[in-house]
Image (tube, grey):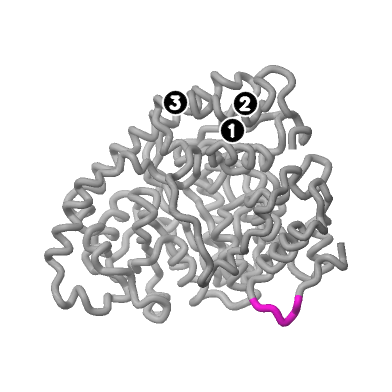
Amino acid sequence: MSFLIELDPAESGPIYLRIADRLRAIMAAGGLAAGARLPSSRALASQLGVARNTVDAAFALLAGEGAIETRRGGGTVVSAALTARVAAPSQRAMALGGSRPDPVAPLAFRMGLPGLDAFPRKTWSGLAVKAARAMGATDMAYPDPAGFRGLREAIAAYLGVSRGIGCTAGQVLITAGFQGALSLVQRVLLRPGDPVWVEDPGYLLARQALDVGGASLVPVPVDAEGMRVKAGVTAAPRAKLAMVTPTHQSPLGVALSLPRRLALLAWAADAGAWVLEDDYDSEFRYTGRPLPALKSLDQAGRVLFAGSFSKVLFPGLRLGYLVVPGTLSEALLRASRLASGGPPMLEQRVAAAFMEQGHFARHLRRMRVLYAGRRRALAAALTSRFGDRVSVELTAGGMHLLARFPGAADDSVLARRALAVGLAPTALSGLSMAHGAGQGLLIGFTNVAEEDAAALVARLGDVVDPVGPQGGGATGSAGA
C-alpha cells in the first residue's frame, strides 16, 4: 500500500479528507478491488506520519459512504458492494460551487432528529408572522453578536429551573447550533496541536470538527459510569479541553456518575483546563427527573455549557447557545463578532416568543409523552421480530435506542444494507476511535409513529436476515 497512499505535501485541506480522497480515487480507478484489505489505521498512520485518529476519521468517512467495511477478524476491506459512488466528490470538493442533492424527507431510524410530524407549526407560524410585522429599523440593522437579549433572558430563566444553572443573560451567547458553539470554543481556547479529551465512542461530527481545527484528539474510554476520567488524566494530564456529554452520553446513553463529575471538575481546576458540556437531549428523560447539569456543580468557572434547539424544536432553525464563565465572555463575544456578526434576528425573536409565552414548556411535555410511547413501540417490535436474537438497550432518556444482533453481519454492513432499503440506523462500531463498544445499531425512534413501528422493523428484519428470519440469514461477514 505504500506506493498507493502518498499525500502531496503542497496540497491544502484537512488531512483526513485528503486520505479519504486518495483512497476513494484509487477505488474508482480500480486499484483497489472489492474485498481488498486495507492496512490497519495504526500502520497507515505510521506510514504517513500522522495521528492514528486522523486515519480513523478518514476510514469512518468512507465507511459511512459504504465504500469500506470492517470484518470480524478480517480487518478493514473495500466493500463487496463497491459501486461508482466511491467516485463521488468529497466533502471538500463540494464545499464551494459543487452540486448538492435536493433535500429529501428524513429516513426512518435516523438519530438526532426530533419528531417533526408533531411540531406545532401553526403556533410557530403565527409567532413568525407577528415577529415579522413588528420588525423595526433596528431589527434590520446588524444584530447583537451575543444574540437577541430577549432570547438570552428566556434561556437563562429556563436553565435555572430545568438544569440548575444559575446564570444571567450576560453569560449566554446565542450560536448557530452546537457546531457554532464548538467553532467559537475552538477559536478562543485551542491552538493547533492542543490535546483535547473526547469520549470514545463519541459524537463523530464534533470529533471531526476538532480534528479539522488542528486539535490533537485524546480518546477517553466510556463505561457504565460515563467517561473514565482517570484514563484521561493518564493519557493527557495537561489537555486543554475535555468535551463531554455527561447527562446522556452520546452514543451509549449512560450518565456521568457524581464521583466522576467531581473528578473531572477537580482535574480541570488543577490543570487550568476547560470542559465543554454538550447538553444535547437532556430534556427527554423517561425515568425520574432530568439530571442536573455538570455546569451546576462548577465552582471554579471551568465549564462551558452548550445547548441547542435542534433536538427540542427543529434542526433547520440553526440556533443554539453557550453559557460561558465570566472570564471568557469578552473573548467569545469578539470571536462571534468576527465569525458571523451574530445569528439572524427574526428567528431569535420567534424562539424567544415561543419560550416566553409558555409554548416551549408545553411542547417539551408533549414530546416526552410522545417519545416514551414511540420508544416502547419500537422496542416491542424489535423484540417481537427478532426474539432472543436481539438485545435492546434502553437507557433512562434520549432519542435513540441501541439494538445489538449477536451473530449477525457487522453493524457497518447492516447499516449500509438498511440505507439501501430506506432506513438510516447508525453503526455503533463506526463511532469508536481506540476503545470499541461492540457491535450494534443505533436507532432513532422519535420519527417512528407507534403504528408504523412493526412495518419498519419488518423491513429491518430483511436487512439483518437477508434469506429469512430462521437459519440461512447472514452471520459474521458472510453476507457482506
The span shown in magenta is 8-12
On screen, residue 414 above or below 230: above
Q: Secondary structure at mark 3?
A: helix
Q: Which residue is mark 1?
A: 403
Name the disc covering residue 390, or none: 2
Disc 1 to disc 3, C-alpha distance: 14 Å
The residue at 41%/30% (across/down) is: 374
Q: Residue at x 58, y 64 (%)?
A: 91
Q: Nearer the viewer, residue 255 or 15?
A: 15
The residue where tag 3 is placed is 377
User: Between marks 2 and 1, how big is the CA–CA gap?
Assistant: 6 Å
Left or right: residue 189 compared with residue 446: right
Mark 1 nearby-residue class (10 Å; few <14, some 14–19, many ≥20): many
Task: Confirm or deny contact between disc 1 and disc 3 (CB under 8 A).
Answer: no
Dot 3 amino acid type? Ala
Residue at horizontal 72%, vertical 43%? 81
Q: Amino acid at mark 1?
A: Ala
Horizontal and vertical percent position of residue 343: 33, 69
Evaluate whether residue 249 shows in this view: yes
Looking at the image, which is closer to me, 27 or 327?
27
Report the residue at 50% width, 51% height from top: 246
- Secondary structure found at label 1: strand
| Crowd around label 2: few <14 · some 14–19 · many ≥20 (10 Å) | some
How many badges with numbers are in the image? 3
- Asked if marks 2 and 1 touch (Cβ < 8 Å), the reply is yes
Quarter of the image with the N terminus in it: bottom right
Magenta stretch containing residue 403, yes or no?
no
Q: Amino acid at mark 2?
A: Val
With 310 as the anchor, is 439 left or right in this view? right
